[in-house]
Image (cartoon, coloured by chain):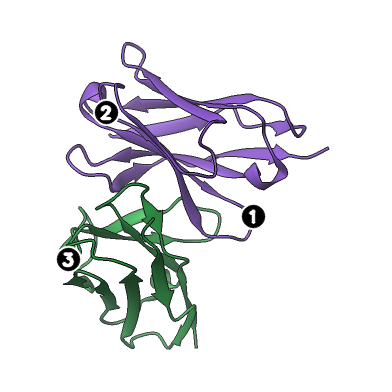
Amino acid sequence: EIVMTQSPVTLSVSPGERATLSCRASQSVNSRLAWYQQKPGQAPRLLIHDASTRATGIPARFSGSGSGTEFTLTISSLQSEDFAVYYCQQYNNWPLTFGGGTKVEIK
Amino acid sequence: EVQVVESGGNFIQPGGSLRLSCAASGFTFSSCALSWVRQAPGKGLEWVSAITGSGVTTYYADSVKGRFTVSRDNSKNTVYLQMNSLRAEDTAVYYCAKDNCDYYYMDVWGRGTTVTVSS
């Protein structure tokens, strides 16, 4: 099983600042990496797939990069609605696996 | 509008069985895989199971293998998750999610249905 490790667990950021979230895979997942956003009491929402492709309707301030085992989600200028938990997920191998999540909170 | 809606969650005693349903609409159902993902209270996301569009191939997390069975009825645009031998650690919100029709990332999620396993 591929283990996905996200860091940091919690990220404190002021509105308007940049947020950088990391996701590491225990072995290569090529570019088969997705990012999701989840707000309290809501279902997750797809943000990024194929490591760097924004899903439909996702603002340009969200960007993804990386390949192999190291991936990054960047939010260029945090808006109030971006404070949430973010998960990465690999879909290169079975079983599918998620990272433990990074909570982005208001500083 | 592409949509998936879960139902069937309930309070159940350990060792019991439950069947969840996921009704889909707005896309060519038989062309796309669907996954079940769960979230225990206060915890992260855990992928549980997936089924291909044809229903021929199924996948399971080790934590549920042998106890859970995923199936689909393409004539009803519905996917099912039969859960047997339920344990306290199966307590979670269970989400149904449509996989991208080419790859196994989840592009549309339902609101979830709650399963509570307790005596």
Q: Do the residues labelled 3 and 2 touch (CB within 8 Å)?
A: no
Viewer-proximal residue among B83 and A63: B83
- In which quadrant is the N terminus of chain B drawn? top left
Q: Do the numbered discs 1 and 2 sit on residues whose CB atoms are within 8 Å?
A: no
The chain identifier of the residue carrying mark 1 reads B
Q: Give coordinates of residue B81: x percent, y percent.
A: 50, 27
Residue at coordinates 28% horizontally, 51% vertically from top-left? A93
Locate residue B113: give its quadrant: top right
Vertical arrangement, residue A33 with respect to residue A12, above or below: above
* Residue holding disc 1: B41
Name which residue type carries label 1: Pro
Residue at 28% in and 29% down:
B52
Q: Nearer the viewer, mark 1 or mark 2?
A: 1
Q: Determine which residue is flagged by label 2.
A: B26
Mark 1 or mark 2, earlier in chain: 2
Report x, y in % for residue B53: 26, 26
Question: Which amino acid type is shown beneath numbered disc 3?
Answer: Ser
* Chain identifier matching the green colour in the rendered picture: A
Specify few, some or many for label 3: CA neighbours under 10 Å numbering under 14, 14-19, or 20 or more. Answer: many
| Cα separation between marks 3 and 2 | 26 Å
Residue farthest to the right, as pictured: B119
Q: Are marks 1 and 2 on the same chain?
A: yes
The chain identifier of the residue carrying mark 2 reads B
Q: Where is residue B76 in the image (x, y as percent from the top left)?
A: 36, 13
Left or right: B102 as drawn, with respect to B76: left
Q: Name the residue under label 3.
A: A52
What is the secondary structure assignment of the residue under circle 3? Answer: loop
Identify whether A65 is placed above or below A34. Answer: below
What's the chain of the residue with tag 3?
A
Chain whose colour in the figure is purple: B
Task: Kindly indicate whether the residue at mark 1 contacts the one at mark 3 (C-beta within 8 angstroms).
Answer: no
